[in-house]
Image (tube, rainbow, N blue to C red):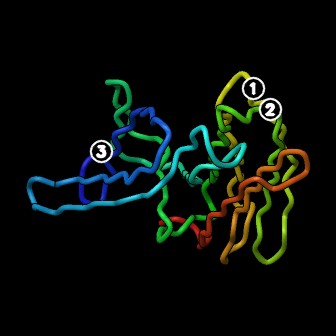
Amino acid sequence: MSGPGVPIVYECELEFKPGAYDIVAVAHEASSGLVASAEITLAWPGDSGPPATVGPIALLQPSSGAFLREGETRSTGSLARNHADPIYLDRPTALIGLVCRNRRKGGAVSVERSLVGSSVIELPPLSFDLDEDRCAQLRDVLPENTLTPGAYRYEVRVLQNDRIVDERSRDFVIVGPSA
């Protein structure tokens, strides 16, 4: 695959110690000199604070492009959409996040998720026992053509003993079919 506008994606796993982080990504296209960058601020839970936290919510859609993971290249993969990118209704959409526990305040948590748009869709609650594992992934996949064009908010609430201990949301806009 070649030509202008082809996404190039380098995928790798990173581990973070507890604390606050500013993650900066920079790409430089050598032949044109074009430079693109993005920055995200996040705080990874430590031994103080709430019993559990929900991390940033990633929104992914399948795409053609050049994808590199663990030394292997592919021509298709999942492309992370930033807050300003439109979400195409004719592609499946994955909403992915992590729920992580405070090392000193483990135990079972429940996670409530909802999708708020022209109506509210309550998704089935999830339960995680975070005594063994420090983090659990949540993933909600919306099949293509599930939603209609418009503005939406994905809301996540983490509860322990029926009390909200953390919450996070992600806004996005669904548009018509992809080109």
Residue occupied by mark 2: 107
Query: Is disc 1 placed on a helix, strand or loop?
Result: loop
Query: Marks 2 and 3, how far apart in space?
Result: 48 Å
The image quarter containing residue 145 is: bottom right
Query: Is disc 3 placed on a helix, strand or loop?
Result: loop
Q: From the viewer's perspective, is the residue at label 1 or at label 3 nearer?
A: 1
Which residue in the rendered view is the most extreme toward the right?
A: 162
Q: Residue at x 71, y 53 (%)?
A: 142
The image quarter containing residue 38 is: bottom left
Query: Marks 1 and 3, how far apart in space?
Result: 46 Å
Q: Is residue 152 left or right of residue 18?
A: right
Q: Is residue 66 left or right of residue 152?
A: left
Q: Amino acid at mark 3?
A: Met
Q: Are marks 2 and 3 in contact (CB under 8 Å)?
A: no
- 100 or 65: which is nearer to us? 100
Q: Residue at x 71, y 48 (%)?
A: 140
Q: Quadrant of the N terminus?
A: top left
Residue occupied by mark 3: 1
Residue occupied by mark 1: 131
Q: Residue at x 42, y 58 (%)?
A: 40
